[in-house]
Amino acid sequence: MKRIAATLFVAVAGLVASPACAQPPGQQQQQSERAPARGDLAANVRIYEVPQGSRPHDVAPGPDGLVWYTGQRRGTLGILNPETGAVREVPLGEGSAPHGVIMGPDGAAWITDGGLNAIVRVDPATDAVRVWRLPEEFPDSNLNTAAFDREGRIWFTGQTGVYGRLDPRTDEMRVWRDPEGRGPYGIAATPDGEIYYVSLAGSHLARVNRETGATTIIEPPTANQGARRVWADSRGNLWISEWNGGQLTRYTPSTGEWRSWRPEGERPRVYAVYVDDRDIVWITDFGGNATLAFDPGTERWTRYPGSGDNANVRQILGRPGWVYLPESGLDRIMVVRTGS
């Protein structure tokens, strides 16, 4: 385990301010020196630049309205203040290449770091960094995503074919191999604290026994669909993004029922999935360079185009009234206001 405390401060300008997302009185919007965002953004959308070369991968709500993101190429946790557009960075250590970030039950940022092959915690009050490295028998696991169970343990995936569990109270870490090999990617906790993950290369859903670590493989009806991310809604339904299949798919654990929806487009490539506080399901479509919000009640889609070509929005997260989209291809964060 390792502790680091350092912070880089960066002045970054917001690109677009709409009436619905205007800056507070007395704060003047700065102008970006980079190419301006496209002009067809919705009125409830605002774009923020982050340091060039960050390649923001995943994003999460931080405390006090801040937005956390993983600066995968810079080895940092980025912290965006959406009221001012200012960004500061917390370096995670030499060789860091962070992938996922979530807020833990302790209010800290918890990160899956593929470069360090470790789970990393950043204290929001002090910026102190703590590192838990995977056991030596699991090198270069290509760590991806994490979720907390109801016991306060963090579960994580690695694309080389592993998934694991860390108990921060005891520092105990256990790692298991996926029974079908390479591919574990997205992971999610249901409202009752159960843990499921999906395998991109294995094209399956897996339910994890939280005590033994054993998995139950659940095969989706579409073969070789490339299940990439998974998220649970308030009823415990699991929503899955199908990278190869180009679909949004729902699995209902209580009944075993599957259902899929395909967004418009010649060749959709569905990457991320996230369910907001209204049970609206958000996905990103790399093929259409857009983020889409799906209402299961009406089965209607709302489209949010990228702020430029090849926006490549990775994982989505948010808080009530807001959704955050990391545009990894453009070094930008898109913020969508969903509440009044």
Image: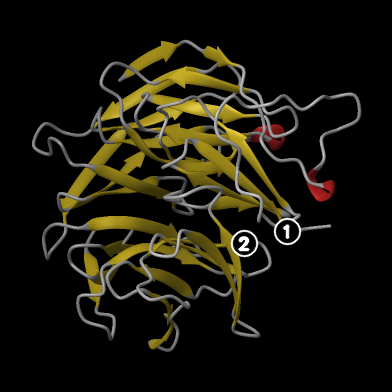
Relative to 221, does residue 145 appear above or below in the rendering? above
Relative to residue 61, is residue 315 drawn left or right?
left
Circles 2, 1 touching at the beta carbon (< 8 Å): yes
Residue hosting label 2: 276
Q: Which quadrant of the structure image shows residue 130?
A: top left
Q: How many marks?
A: 2
Q: Residue furthest right?
A: 25
| Residue under the image location 25 percent in, 21 percent down | 95
Kind of residue at badge 1:
Thr
Q: Which residue is mark 1?
A: 338
Query: Label 2 to label 1, Cα distance in Å?
Result: 9 Å
Residue 194, x across and y down, in percent: 42, 63
Residue 166 x/y as whole percent: 33, 40
**Above-or-below relation of 334 to 3:** below
**Local crowd size for mark 2, using a 10 Å CA cut-off: few (<14), some (14–19), many (≥20):** many
- First in sequence: mark 2 vs mark 1: 2
Quadrant holding the C terminus: bottom right
Does residue 191 show up? no
Q: Please determine whether, in this image, residue 66 is positioned above or below residue 185.
A: above
